[in-house]
Image (cartoon, helix red, strand yellow):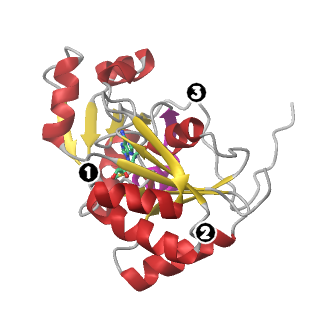
Amino acid sequence: MSRARPFPGVSAVNPLDPSGLIQLVATPIGNLGDITFRAAESIRQADIVACEDTRHSRRLLEHLGIREKELVALHDHNERYRATALVDRVKDGARLVYLSDAGMPGISDPGYRLVNAAHEAGVRVEVLPGPCAVVTALAGSGMPSDAFFFGGFLSVKSGRRTRELSESLERRETSIFYESPHRLGGTLEILQRLAPDREVCVARELTKRFETYHRGSAAELSVYFSAHPPKGEITLLIRGAGKD
Ligand code: SAM
């Protein structure tokens, strides 16, 4: 049988490759019941659990009844150099699981440099899907979801933040941002100045006891949240300029 000639620059790893495996595993964004069977099993079988914060992930492992795992910290400040050393261990046959503090690793979280290093070294990568705030918020907002823009965290600098928001107001599709509760008031204030009638949704504490979707115009929500300063975790959605 003839073998396909390799395409220069294209890499792919055969699932039957005997070297180890890196699994990016999504974890709950607030409700421990959202851990998947597959996630729990992969953590159980891992030789190394790399995580954004070892103390945080140890609590999750304890909840799953998993003890005595090797936990290694891999976060924004050390991912660049530690990823290569971890990938080397996987090349020698180890199974490595990566967990961020919550949700899908790599989405406004560390993880992508590790995956990139793995692809470059020809190491097999799998992603175990699960909770992710951006997708959960979009599904629960009732805003058009066939296409969307995700901007991660809005800039902390007010000039840049204003620019990011005005660009979003031009987009046809729904825009989604991660936001901190103490900056939400300022962001709504900018939005109500730029587009007072535009529909906005504040998705708060998703999957938790006080999960709430506040919907209204930018002007209405700005007034509401200045009277009720929000607490907890927040994802902000802005309806696109397109018709729907
Ligand atoms: N990797 C995560 C994911 O898959 O969603 C996101 C990590 S990012 C560092 C954390 C931000 O996501 C929070 O500051 C908040 O804006 C948003 N977020 C996380 N959990 C949330 C929740 N339960 N409800 C609303 N927003 C949430």
Residue 164 rendering spot, x and y as whole percentages:
52, 75
Which is more foreground, mark 3 or mark 2? 2
Badge 2, how many Cα within 10 Å: few under 14, some, many 20+? many
Badge number at residue 74: 1
Q: Is mark 1 within 8 Å of ligand 1?
A: no
Q: Is residue 41 magenta?
A: no
Looking at the rendering, which quadrant does residue 76 occupy? bottom left
Looking at the rendering, which quadrant does residue 31 occupy? top left
Q: Nearer the viewer, residue 102 or 213?
A: 213
* Magenta-tinted stretch: 114-128
Badge number at residue 16: 3
Q: Is residue 119 magenta?
A: yes
Residue 53 rendering spot, x and y as whole percentages:
19, 45
Indicate the amino acid at tag 1: Leu
Q: Earlier in the sequence, mark 1 or mark 3?
A: 3
Residue for point 27% across, 41% down: 50
Note whether 48 is above or below 222 in the view shown: above
Residue for point 32% across, 24% down: 43
Q: Nearer the viewer, residue 93 or 208?
A: 208
